[in-house]
Image: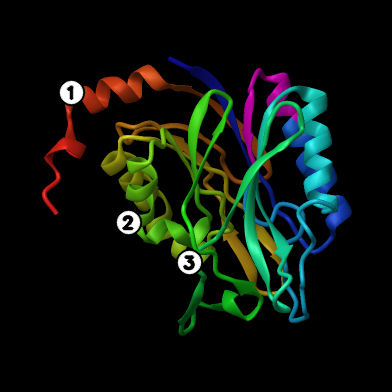
Amino acid sequence: MARVKTAEIQLCSTEEVAQNLIEAEAQVRAGAADGATLIALPENTGFLKTRNHPDPGEPLETSIIVNRFQDLAKELEVTILLGSFHRCSEFEERAYNTSVLINERGDVVGHYDKIHLFDIDVPGEVSFKESNDIVPGQEPVMLQGAGLNIGLTVCYDLRFPELYRKLTDIGAQVLTVPAAFTAETGKHHWLVLLRARAIENQCYVVAPDQWGRHGGKRHSHGESVIIDPWGQVIAKVGDGVGYATAWIDTELIDRIRRNLPCAQHRRL
């Protein structure tokens, strides 16, 4: 059984990489000082694109953004989920939107490439085509970190429950949803979808979100939360940059799954 204090960090990233990393590092340090040993950052932590120009990304091994958090994880002896950065592709000009898990020794445990891309046009509200810059990933990814089985997803993946069911089937106890969820859709759908993913899979959900206006038309919802496997919000960040903590307890997961064995009742 594991009991892990977890911090989720809410940021307002822009295209200014150096400033983004300063702010993110400050929040990671604050979460670690509060006793968290698993710390999750949002999507596009180090660079959030707001202008229409090419963004080929960086190689994972030499990324300025990834290396910064590898050093920080090692120094603080914590596990860090870098919500996402743009990882360059050797095959084409577009990049992958990649979530990275880094252990307490500063090693990259593994990474996940966002599968579902946000190509949407809601007249008068939001218009965005992620596939202009991003190549979709192909495979679900579950990794082990901080003594937990962690299923990695990113933002728009949240609307596709079959991905989360697959992650649970292969052993996930925690589902991570780092995001830059739009303000327009977030106020209606963000929390209800997160609670649904927690309830139906009987997993913890850790969802660090971007918040506020990033420049141009980019405006994120915020309301970063940690949700327990009964669907209860056990930590939440309000408006602004900040962090919140909660305990992840695998005994609670086991008890809920034992008392309400939904997975054993599936017929389709």
Tag 3–tag 1 contact (CB < 8 Å): no
Amino acid found under the numbered disc labelled 2: Glu
Q: Position of residue 267 (x, y in %)?
A: 11, 49
Pick whichever of labels 2 and 3 is earlier in the sequence.
3
Horizontally, residue 256 falls left or right of residue 208, namely left
Query: In the rendered structure, which segment of residues is drawn in magenta?
Result: 29-41
Q: CA distance from mark 2 to mark 3?
A: 12 Å
Amino acid found under the numbered disc labelled 1: Asn
Eye-nearest disc, 1 or 2: 2
SS of the residue under disc 1: helix
Return the residue nearer the eye: 254 or 137.
137
Pick whichever of labels 1 and 2 is earlier in the sequence.
2
**How busy is the neighbourhood of tag 2: few (under 14 within 10 Å), some, or many (20 plus)?**
few
Q: Position of residue 144 (x, y in %)?
A: 54, 33
In this rendering, is residue 202 above or below 16?
Answer: above
Q: CA distance from mark 1 to mark 2?
A: 23 Å
As for residue 32 lying within the magenta part, the answer is yes
Q: Which residue is mark 3?
A: 116
Q: Residue at x 77, y 32 (%)?
A: 106
Work out which residue is located at the far front of the displayed protein and give it. Answer: 91
Q: Which residue is mark 1?
A: 259
State which quarter of the image contains the C terminus.
bottom left
Q: Which residue is mark 2?
A: 162
Amino acid found under the numbered disc labelled 3: His
